[in-house]
Amino acid sequence: MILLWGLPRDGPLRAVYSALKSRNAPVCLFDQHSIASATLDLNVGATVHGTLQWDGNALALEAVTAIYARPYDVRRLPMLSEAGPLSPLWHHGMALDDGMQAWVEVTPALVVNRPSMMASNSSKPYQAELIRAAGLDLPDTLVTTDAKAAMAFHEYHGSVIYKSTSGVRSIVSRLGPEHKERLMDIGNCPTQFQQYIPGADYRVHVVGDRVFAAQIVSDADDYRYAGRSGGRTEIRACTLEPELSERCRRLAAELGLFFAGVDLRRSPEGRWYCFEVNPSPGFTFYQEATGQKIAESVASLLADA
């Protein structure tokens, strides 16, 4: 049995579920909306076994051969946030989520991806060192709470972008004169500044041994939000040099990720830079633009387990 864990309306989860159903693979989806009535019995010893029950379903944990985990932050589920942190429902939901997180960490089943393997993305500076160790270049980077240091870094490079140091999504923006007054605020929030690298963006999805590359042409600093500023973004499938594809495969493997989204940029001089590795990529954005069969590849990975 293959288990999918998350919300049915989540695009990647829905796409993989459809791909598994189309190949008649044994699959079930644990909908987090059912968390109020769900129960988990988890036993860890010589073996990992137990039962997950929800909405009339009873799943033996030892029968699960593969898991695709994209759980939503349980604290932000409407039923829990409305009940509040002092409610029995909140405590039940948090306990069930903790149990699920523990299970996907220790189960012998294939997990895409285990929480411990995804953790490097929670600290961009730490992950950057892992990327560098894998043989990929990174832009010159400064993480600081010192406004003067940030200004000196900007003056040295001439053009600098800033973003969060954590795994929380932030809009990548270029540092400009309009930010000078707010720069003192970094004293309360460590901020990551990076040398701006001109060039074309690439998103590389690594699924097991398969590599799907897409080139992004955009006139925005952060192409994901180009529409907000009236910018344009074009995404098209492409093929990477074999050596670069292998580096991306090796990077994902060394991070312990069966599925990863690698963000690259190629400078006008032909030098490749890696910005980060997403351990739970929202791949449907790229699949819909390129026609690449990423969901089918993830489904194959899970079914072959």
Image (tube, grey):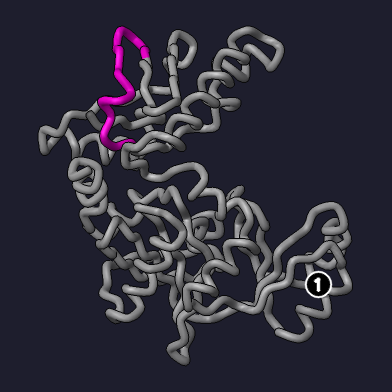
Does the image show residue 49?
A: yes
Q: Residue 272, percent across and down?
A: 46, 81
Residue at image position (66%, 70%) is 161
Question: Residue type at mark 1?
Answer: Ala
Magenta region includes residue 63: yes
Q: Nearer the viewer, residue 152 or 142?
A: 142
Q: Nearer the viewer, residue 180 or 74?
A: 74
**Secondary structure beneath label 1:** helix
Q: Is residue 167 above or below residue 210?
A: above
Magenta region includes residue 102: no
Q: Residue 80, percent across and down?
A: 58, 17
Within 10 Å of disc 1 (Cα), the crowding (few <14, some 14-19, many 20+) is many
Residue at image position (27%, 79%) is 242
In this picture, residue 116 sits left or right of residue 185: left
In this picture, residue 58 sits left or right of residue 267: left
Q: Residue 257, percent across and down?
A: 40, 54
Image quarter of the N terminus: top left
Q: Is residue 247 above or below residue 292?
A: below
Residue bounds of the magenta highlight:
53-67
Residue at image position (58%, 27%) is 76
Q: Residue 287, percent across and down?
A: 28, 54
Does the image show residue 216?
A: no
Q: Nearer the viewer, residue 2 or 263?
A: 2
- Residue 207 picture quarter: bottom left
